[in-house]
Image (spheres, grey):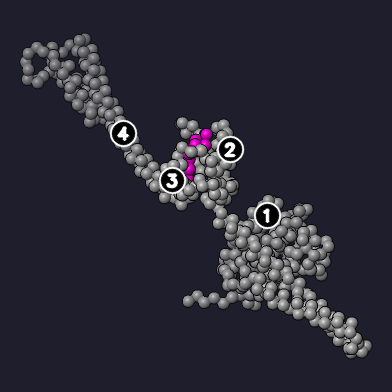
């Protein structure tokens, strides 16, 4: 238009429109080139003759205006694109957050564990269906109630003033259902802060059955230990009765006391005591039942328990257990009891030692699995009465080693002292069990 119109009209200002369009699609350096090109065209097709003193300032002013318009259009376009990208990103985040919230809500509602969220005063804000079932409350009725009504211990936690410190812990306490029924609860809770105030998230598990199982298992172990103890004592009584019987027969033969009534009464008493001991031994033999067990699994369980137990006294445990040990005849809890008893004895022996370490190793020799437990303690001065019960110098009950060996012998094993190692060492012997892998 500037070229074809011959009238004395200056169209330089109209070059702003193409620069406005160019700024939306070209990068800055190309916008500058377009501004130079438009400035040259305006001067070439302008109605005024070229004069350096007037054309140069006019061209510089026009170039600055055109390039400024193009760059302004570029910046506005870039800003608009960024806003659109941010808007799309926010929409995606909102959609993902909404989906995550829906999934989290589904997980909470379908969880087999009671989940609750309370505010600082203990008022329940969120409760899943399992929480309503656990506390015997109708659907949706827990919200708005105070948690201290059901778990009094949590009422003290939530009543504290909000601090910057967060709590993530667990406890076992007594809880109450809505029908006043009492049960034992394992409570896992944590505190966190939101824009509207502190919150307390709680997971509650009914531990009543675990308590019952522990009580039943403790009773079974007590009965089993008592039977083993009675069996071991009965065995010793039988040995004594056998010795008395031999002496009785010798006296009867050498001194002619066969017809003496007192002597005959003494023999009857010895015979009756022998029968009683034999009867108790037969009954007590069923105290522990040997089963085919995976020894590696039992030793892994023992390692979890014993390492935590020894860490309290700064004792290092070194394990040298092959990856694949054969199955053995044993009672799981009986074997764990023996390992725990040996570790307790080593812990007492290492109290004053400079090097505190317990070594546990396992090996297979001649069809028997040997588990060696040794420590770096001062050792044992005399091992003659080591496995005898109720010793006078025993630091505890004096029955630990006696019962441990009795346990091992109940399932075709044995426990013996190893005098050849430095410090104190014991060897557990277990019979290998043939397992059909078909």
Q: From the viewer's perspective, is the residue at label 1 or at label 2 nearer? A: 2
Helix or strand or loop: what does disc 1 sit on? Answer: helix
Residue 37 magenta-drawn? Answer: no
Image location of residue 433, percent across then percent down: 59, 75
Badge 2 or badge 4: first in the primary sequence? 4
Residue 119 magenta-drawn? Answer: yes
Name which residue lies at 43% across and 47% down: 129
Q: In which quarter of the image is residue 148?
A: top right
Q: Name the residue under label 2.
A: 156
Helix or strand or loop: what does disc 2 sit on? Answer: helix
Q: Mark 4 points at which residue?
A: 87
Q: Name the residue under label 1.
A: 310
Is 118 placed left or right of 211 in the picture? left
Image location of residue 135, percent across then percent down: 49, 47
Badge 4 or badge 3: first in the primary sequence? 4
Is 104 placed left or right of 325 in the picture? left
Image location of residue 301, percent across then percent down: 59, 61
Question: Where, quadrant-wise, is the N terminus in this rendering?
Answer: top left
């Amino acid at each position: 238009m500037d070229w074809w119109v011959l009238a004395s009209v200056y169209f330089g200002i109209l070059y702003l429109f193409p620069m406005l369009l160019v700024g939306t699609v070209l990068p800055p350096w190309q916008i500058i080139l377009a501004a130079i090109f438009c400035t040259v065209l305006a001067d070439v097709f302008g109605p005024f003759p070229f004069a350096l003193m007037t054309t140069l300032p006019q061209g510089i002013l026009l170039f600055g205006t055109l390039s400024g318009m193009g760059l302004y259009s570029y910046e506005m376009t870039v800003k608009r694109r960024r806003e659109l990208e941010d808007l799309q990103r926010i929409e995606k985040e909102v959609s993902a957050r909404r989906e995550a919230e829906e999934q989290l809500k589904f997980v909470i509602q379908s969880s087999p564990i009671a989940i609750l969220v309370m505010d600082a005063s203990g008022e329940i804000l969120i409760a899943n269906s399992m929480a309503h079932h656990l506390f015997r409350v109708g659907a949706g009725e827990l919200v708005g109630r105070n948690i201290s009504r059901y778990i009094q211990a949590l009422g003290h936690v939530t009543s504290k003033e909000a601090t910057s410190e967060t709590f993530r812990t667990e406890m076992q306490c007594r809880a109450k259902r809505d029908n006043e029924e009492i049960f034992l609860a394992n409570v896992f809770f944590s505190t966190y802060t939101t824009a509207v105030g502190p919150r307390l998230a709680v997971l509650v598990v009914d531990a009543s059955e675990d308590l019952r199982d522990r009580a039943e298992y403790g009773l079974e172990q007590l009965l089993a230990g008592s039977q083993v103890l009675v069996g071991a004592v009965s065995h010793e009584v039988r040995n004594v009765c056998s010795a008395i019987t031999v002496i009785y027969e010798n006296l009867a033969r050498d001194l002619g006391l066969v017809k003496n009534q007192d002597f005959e009464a003494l023999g009857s008493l010895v015979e009756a005591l022998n029968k009683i001991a034999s009867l108790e031994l037969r009954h007590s033999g069923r105290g522990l039942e040997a089963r085919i067990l995976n020894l590696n699994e039992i030793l892994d369980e023992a390692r979890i328990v014993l390492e935590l137990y020894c860490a309290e006294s700064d004792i290092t445990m070194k394990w040298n257990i092959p990856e694949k040990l054969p199955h053995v005849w044993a009672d799981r809890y009986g074997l764990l009891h023996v390992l725990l008893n040996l570790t307790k004895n080593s812990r007492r022996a290492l109290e004053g030692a400079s090097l505190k370490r317990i070594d546990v190793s396992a090996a297979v020799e001649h069809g028997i699995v040997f588990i060696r437990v040794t420590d770096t303690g001062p050792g044992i001065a005399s091992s003659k009465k080591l496995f005898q019960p109720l010793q006078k110098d025993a630091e505890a009950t004096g029955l630990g080693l006696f019962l441990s060996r009795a346990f091992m012998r109940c399932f075709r094993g044995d426990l013996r002292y190893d005098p050849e190692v430095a410090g104190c060492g014991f060897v557990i012997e277990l019979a290998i069990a043939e397992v059909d892998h078909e």
